[in-house]
Image: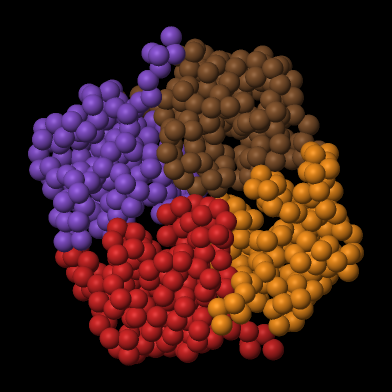
Chain colours: A purple, B brown, C orange, D red
Amino acid sequence: MEGSIIRKIIIGVMGGAQFVTNDEEKYAYQIGKIIALEGWVLLNGGRSSGVMEATAKGARENGGITVGVLPTENASSASQYIDIPIITGMGLARNVINILSSDIVIALPGRAGTISEIALALSHGKQVILFRFEVGTWINYYIDKKQVLVANEVEQLRQLLIEEIY
Amino acid sequence: MEGSIIRKIIIGVMGGAQFVTNDEEKYAYQIGKIIALEGWVLLNGGRSSGVMEATAKGARENGGITVGVLPTENASSASQYIDIPIITGMGLARNVINILSSDIVIALPGRAGTISEIALALSHGKQVILFRFEVGTWINYYIDKKQVLVANEVEQLRQLLIEEIY
Amino acid sequence: MEGSIIRKIIIGVMGGAQFVTNDEEKYAYQIGKIIALEGWVLLNGGRSSGVMEATAKGARENGGITVGVLPTENASSASQYIDIPIITGMGLARNVINILSSDIVIALPGRAGTISEIALALSHGKQVILFRFEVGTWINYYIDKKQVLVANEVEQLRQLLIEEIY
Amino acid sequence: MEGSIIRKIIIGVMGGAQFVTNDEEKYAYQIGKIIALEGWVLLNGGRSSGVMEATAKGARENGGITVGVLPTENASSASQYIDIPIITGMGLARNVINILSSDIVIALPGRAGTISEIALALSHGKQVILFRFEVGTWINYYIDKKQVLVANEVEQLRQLLIEEIY
């Protein structure tokens, strides 16, 4: 019986909270959707804006479970598409929890907040997939080690996730 | 449609990791079970011992979702009954996350670790229910304010939870 | 030359932020003073109230160095008697840092916040000295192990500190 | 009298722990030295390697006070040149504390760990000075806002610090 207990796969999706384009929101929604359809749990920063809101909506509207790790001391900042808000009260120190809790980290375009999450993921040895996001030459060291992969289309991303997870 | 999206109720259960009696483990299992049967999410410290293991087993074997907030940097210390491990890498600072993420905190007998969680919950204004646990006269201030309730039987605890949540 | 480099001894002093009596403030000031006169660093929660303010004032006015570990995201909440504010932005998760950074933890009377710090200190195996503070029977387990000592007068506390440190 | 109490200025210096060149170590030592000679406190990640060790040595050997914010649960990983170890037990979540506690953040070359600290500093609105460190085009947004300044020589860095602080 216990052999049938299988921990859920958790996919972290990071990306901008502000200054997100319509295209980026559409991609974020689709990425949330494929995560849900594969039966994986979506984890993000939990707030009701930008990539966070769009991925959670995409996962939630397609039957997925959504976990949001919030920087605040209560859930009032949470997206309505988050099932399970994890309330840290720790500000950006929660970025580390996002990374450590994710089996794989996907990064969509963002500014310093998203860069910090990519960098923390790499410091912790996590697998990162950049989705349509140029982050500068410092990342080449990690691309060469295959710790960072790159995807430009949602189906390509889904294939990379499946290869990495199974 | 969006009106049908309802965030899950999260019940935190704290208690000893070591030196837990057989009776305490049985109670912990039953408390996990009633949480699952009510459709609530169980949240605890995630490890594979004592009250954590027993509540997660009780919830998991009765169809519930279990979230474990781990002190470690990876999931290898997690109970097999945890569906969604939240990995903090923050040691006992994760106790604050346990408290903030729980709509209500139940405390079974434990030592300093459990006392710290009760005290952090009270500092944050959270509702606490002590289950068969005497923690000393300092708690009376909070019992008088009804921030701390007391239960000695599982059915009594279930009634208190229902009154507080709905 | 390097043999002459000696890390500073850090004494943590915890206690109430609110509801502190005049007597408790006087004791707190004197405890800050003896810490400074011994050449030790005072560490506390950094804010400008209660035991924190009084111990920092006592240390600062007697030539000591004061470190305050703040829960906030900036130093505006800091006591004016803090030389070195450590800004965590982590709320009460900073209580763990107070404890881990202190070679010995002194606890004056307080409510849940102070209890959480005592409990976290004991969970981490730190030496605690209770100063005129009854915290309930749960502490007896730790008193029996001599992990908790008790002092009622400042001179007695100074003697205990010297015995523990040297 | 209270007007004479002036909080110390804290300068954070970040940079690589491994793969640090001899030149980078020499620069790091000199940067620690100028911080000490100006009467400022040096804050870094506290460990006994790379830029951390060299800046602490430079500050300590020139009469400065050094604060190291450690990721570990005890001080055994601390550089011998750290006067005041702040022990967080929080792993890389301590990077946030480094940033928030620094009045200004200087970044020397490093990999993902250093990038995460620069990014966290910018997310928190902190002033950053890059010292001989190219971090990619994502930083240009912040250079345009003058939140990021650039220095290539120690004397130039000293001038920038003085302009920013006073």
Q: Residue at x 43, y 34 (%)?
A: B75
In the rendered structure, the answer to whether residue B107 lies left or right of residue D22 reads: right
Residue C47 in percent (x, y) is at 63, 66
Q: Residue at x 54, y 38 (%)?
A: B98
Percent of width and height locating residue A112: 28, 59
Q: Residue at x 65, y 19 (%)?
A: B25
Above or below B48: residue D146? below
Q: Is residue C141 left or right of residue C14?
A: right
Q: Quadrant of residue D100?
A: bottom left
Asked whether the viewer can see residue B131, the reply is yes
Give the residue displayed 58% in from the left and 21% down from the top.
B54
Q: Where residue A113 sits: x, y (%)?
A: 31, 56
Residue B165 can be seen in this image: no
Q: Is residue C37 left or right of residue A39?
A: right
Q: Nearer the viewer, residue C77 or D77?
A: D77
Q: Quadrant of residue D117?
A: bottom left
- Which quadrant of the figure contains the C terminus of chain A? top left
